[in-house]
Amino acid sequence: YRIDIGKTDILETESILEPRIKRIRNQKAICCAVDTGDKSRYVDIWQKVISYRDKFPRSGSTHRFLSLSMDNPLITSHEKCRFYVGITIAETIVAENGFTIQEIPGGLYAIFLHKGNYAMLPELYQFIHEKWLPQNGYSQRCPLSFEVYLNSPRETEVSELLTEVYI
């Protein structure tokens, strides 16, 4: 997520600006790295993740689509930011074909709900880091943040997309 300060208006989004605070357990995800400099392959990578997920038996909400941002783009240059897309997993899986297993540390998270176009997410991140965290006495333990996609752009209008942002 790249933030262009001064050109955003968080009030234009339908994000829930007051998060749920929740303690989560350690989680694992099987993921594919995204080259942040080559957005043209983004759809192909998601298709690869969907195909990989379809290999596993459905086990309720075990396999949720997510993305992981391992770096803070306000500190790390855009070219060096590590970004992954994948699915959460409960079972033991061997990563293959360019996939890796990523650990999501357990702990206390602020969970914001964003409704609408994914393109508006940078505004939410800007609000979280510049306003919500300092005004509420929280700090981010590590630069990792992640998004869980509650529905799919294949089946849902862009204006109705639901994304949980975990900080």
Image: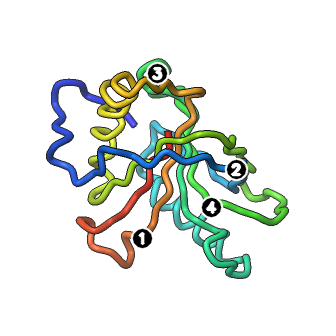
| Label 1 crowd bin: few (<14), some (14–19), many (20+), radius 10 Å | some
Circle 3 SS class:
loop
In front: label 3 or label 4? 4
* Mark 3 to mark 1 CA distance (whole Å): 30 Å
For residue 77, the mark is 3
Q: What residue type is labelled 1?
A: Ser
In front: label 3 or label 1? 1
Circle 1 SS class:
loop
Where is residue 35 drawn, in percent x and y? 53, 41
Residue name at image x 46 percent, y 21 percent: 77
Q: Which amino acid does label 2 sit on?
A: Arg
Residue name at image x 68 percent, y 81 percent: 58
In front: label 4 or label 2? 2
Q: What residue type is labelled 3?
A: Ser
| Label 2 crowd bin: few (<14), some (14–19), many (20+), radius 10 Å | few
Q: Which amino acid does label 4 sit on?
A: Ile
Which comes sooner in the sequence, label 2 or label 1?
2
Residue name at image x 27 percent, y 38 percent: 123
Which comes sooner in the sequence, label 3 or label 1?
3
Task: Name the residue beneath numbered marker 4.
Answer: 87
Task: Name the residue beneath numbered marker 1.
Answer: 152
In front: label 2 or label 1? 2
Q: In which quarter of the image is residue 78?
A: top left
Task: Name the residue beneath numbered marker 2.
Answer: 25
Whether residues under marks 3 and 1 lie with C-beta atoms below 8 angstroms apart, the answer is no
